[in-house]
């Protein structure tokens, strides 16, 4: 698959996942900027990309969005801008895809129920649209290798500064409000700020996962690899997630060997790998359940297992769980927000470190993820 097609497919799938919409689509402007071409679709079936180019003036939703602001249709039956919405959809959010001041297209998410998208959804889609516009621009420039590598570097730097920093600040402000620093909150206000905080946490995880994947595709952006104390990375992941597990009523325990095996990789990457695995285990284990993280030697390898008594993974979903933006049906049905990127990041990192992962799971009984990393000997 060509790079641009891959970017468009992932953007549509990511938008649908982030907003929990029923469908999503990407439309691209042609060279003259007056016609929209179908780019990618998710959830629209075989007809999602059918049709010829659409003159911009015949799609008021896209035309208004490309003027520079997101557009929300709460009820298609009462909004003239909804002309051209796919059949059966009552609500939509449309954001412009603009990179460095240049419009490249639009990003749509559709819902079957009226009024299903709120301000938080719009903000999330705007942020994802900014990332998507940059990625589309980079993909179109793939023929020029030097420009492509420079664009990737700029993309990651801009993303880190423009998205991660404001999200971190917003998280701090929301936590301060929830702790009462701005005065006592009503029950409704506290619930609203708690939901905002969860959305910000979700957006932060999405940004971090995208940055890890971007670094994997541009080696010059990655942290230099070297010897890493594996026990420390596993321990940091458990320590970070212990408060969440305690609050949720999930038993999170760690059993590691006394020695500290050394592996080859990066501290940042290994920390992220085990945070993703352990956080998934805690997330999908109900109160009263257990998560056990163990580490042991096995010949020239060190083996880390993350076992839980959670919801498990359906057998027909197991072959797909490491795909980007994929979530198992029972995970989607659970009241837990996810990016669909966590295990894709795990797989990407393990491939970089010449490591492997095995999964054993039964729906309703739990899952065990087993990671094998080659031991690195400092004496060569």
Image (cartoon, helix red, strand yellow):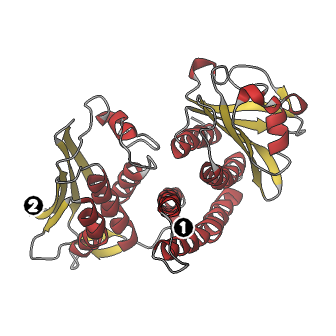
Q: Is residue 354 visible?
A: no
Q: Determine contact: label 1, label 2, CB under 8 Å.
A: no
Residue name at image x 59 percent, y 28 percent: 112
Residue name at image x 67 percent, y 52 percent: 126
Residue 29: image x %, image y %? 81, 38
Q: Which residue is mark 2?
A: 299
Image quarter of the N terminus:
top right
Report, in whole angstroms, how far the alpha carbon at label 1 lies from the one at label 2: 33 Å
Front residue of this view, candidates 57 and 286: 286
Q: Which secondary structure, mark 2?
A: loop
- In this rendering, is residue 252 above or below 177? above
Pointer 1 or 2: first along the chain: 1
Taking the image as shown, residue 237 lies to the left or right of residue 209, namely: left
Residue 200: image x %, image y %? 52, 61
Front residue of this view, candidates 82 and 77: 77
Taking the image as shown, residue 348 lies to the left or right of residue 92, namely: left
Image quarter of the C terminus:
bottom left
- In this rendering, is residue 325 above or below 223? above
Residue name at image x 70 percent, y 32 percent: 75
The crowd level at tag 1 (other Cα within 10 Å; few <14, some 14-19, many 20+) is few
Q: Give residue 131's quadrant in the image.
A: bottom right
Residue 372: image x %, image y %? 21, 56
Q: Give residue 62's quadrant in the image.
A: top right
The crowd level at tag 2 (other Cα within 10 Å; few <14, some 14-19, many 20+) is few
Which labelled disc corresponds to residue 5?
none
- In this rendering, is residue 277 above or below 16? below
Taking the image as shown, residue 379 lies to the left or right of residue 185, namely: left
Q: Which secondary structure, mark 1?
A: helix
Q: Which residue is mark 1?
A: 220
Taking the image as shown, residue 317 lies to the left or right of residue 164, namely: left
């Amino acid at each position: 698959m060509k790079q641009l097609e891959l970017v468009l497919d992932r953007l549509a799938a990511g938008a649908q996942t982030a907003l929990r919409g029923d469908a999503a689509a990407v439309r691209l402007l042609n060279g003259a900027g007056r016609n929209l071409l179908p780019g990618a679709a998710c959830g629209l079936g075989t007809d999602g990309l059918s049709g010829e180019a659409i003159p911009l003036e015949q799609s008021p939703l896209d035309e208004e969005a490309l003027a520079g602001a997101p557009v929300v249709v709460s009820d298609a039956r009462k909004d003239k801008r909804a002309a051209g919405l796919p059949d059966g959809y009552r609500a939509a959010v449309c954001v412009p895809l603009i990179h460095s001041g240049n419009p490249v297209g639009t990003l749509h998410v559709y819902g079957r129920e009226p009024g299903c998208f709120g301000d938080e959804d719009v903000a999330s889609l705007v942020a994802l649209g900014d990332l998507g516009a940059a990625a589309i621009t980079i993909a179109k420039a793939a023929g020029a290798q030097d420009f492509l590598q420079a664009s990737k570097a700029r993309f990651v730097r801009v993303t880190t500064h423009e998205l991660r920093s404001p999200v971190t600040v917003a998280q701090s402000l929301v936590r301060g409000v929830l702790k009462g620093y701005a005065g006592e909150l009503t029950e409704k206000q506290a619930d609203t700020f708690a939901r905002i905080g969860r959305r910000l946490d979700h957006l932060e995880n999405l940004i971090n996962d995208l940055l890890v994947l971007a670094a994997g595709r541009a080696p010059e952006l990655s942290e230099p690899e070297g010897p890493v104390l594996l026990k420390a990375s596993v321990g940091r992941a458990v320590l970070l997630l212990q408060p969440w597990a305690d609050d949720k009523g999930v038993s999170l325990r760690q059993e590691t060997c006394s020695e500290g095996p050394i592996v080859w990789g990066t501290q940042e990457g290994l920390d992220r790998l085990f945070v993703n695995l352990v956080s998934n285990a805690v997330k999908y284990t109900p109160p009263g359940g257990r998560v056990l993280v163990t580490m042991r030697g096995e010949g020239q390898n060190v083996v880390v297992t993350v076992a839980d008594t959670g919801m498990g993974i359906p057998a027909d979903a197991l072959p797909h769980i490491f795909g980007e933006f994929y979530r198992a049906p029972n995970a989607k049905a659970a009241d837990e927000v996810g990016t669909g990127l966590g295990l894709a990041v795990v797989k990407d990192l393990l491939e970089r470190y010449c490591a492997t992962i095995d999964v054993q799971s039964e729906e309703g009984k739990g899952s065990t993820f087993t990671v094998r990393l080659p031991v690195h000997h400092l004496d060569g």
